[in-house]
Amino acid sequence: MNPKLADVMADILEVKAGELSRETVRDGHPTWDSFNHLRLMTAIEEEFGVQFSMDEIESIETAGQLDDLLGTYLAAA
């Protein structure tokens, strides 16, 4: 997982970056609720200079999916 992404996620979800992995599941994480999901997506957009569609935001279920999506945007830049 992108280390910078892990840092942003850790900050929003109030955990240590090392506690997160590609297998971290949104529905299975105690602080990854709908509000923090929107905060997370906004923080990632600002940090990386990308903009996700609403469909993309809604479809993210794992940290790995988010990492892959971000990777797609960064590769296209």
Image (cartoon, rainbow, N blue to C red):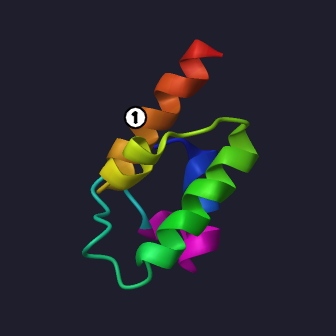
**Does residue 7 appear in this view?**
no
Image quadrant occupied by the N terminus: top left
Is 53 or 62 nearer to us in this picture? 53
Residue shown at 40% from the left, 42% from the top = 56
For the point 31% across and 49% down, which residue is it?
Answer: 59
**Location of residue 76 by image quarter:** top right
Whether residue 36 is visible, yes or no, is: yes
Q: Looking at the picture, does residue 68 appear above or below residue 10?
A: above
As drawn, the residue found furthest toward the front would be: 54
Q: What type of secondary structure mainly makes up the magenta span? A: helix
The question of residue 33 being in magenta is answered with no
Quadrant for the C terminus in the image:
top right
Q: Is residue 77 left or right of residue 28?
A: right
- Is 55 rendered above or below residue 23? above
Q: Who is closer to the viewer here, 20 or 69?
A: 69
Element assignment for label 1: helix
**Picture coordinates of residue 58 (x, y %)?**
36, 54
Does residue 14 appear to the left or right of 62 in the view shown? right
Name the residue tied to disc 1.
Answer: 68
At which x and y percent is residue 44? 63, 50
What's the residue at 34%, 44% (across, down)?
Answer: 65
On the picture, is 69 further left or further right than 44? Answer: left
Estimate the x, y position of residue 5 in percent, counting from the top left: 58, 49
Q: Amino acid at mark 1?
A: Asp
Q: Residue at x 56, y 17 (%)?
A: 75
Q: In the rendered view, would you say 39 is above or below 75? A: below
Q: Which residues are magenta?
A: 10-19
Q: How many numbered dots are placed on residues in this image?
A: 1
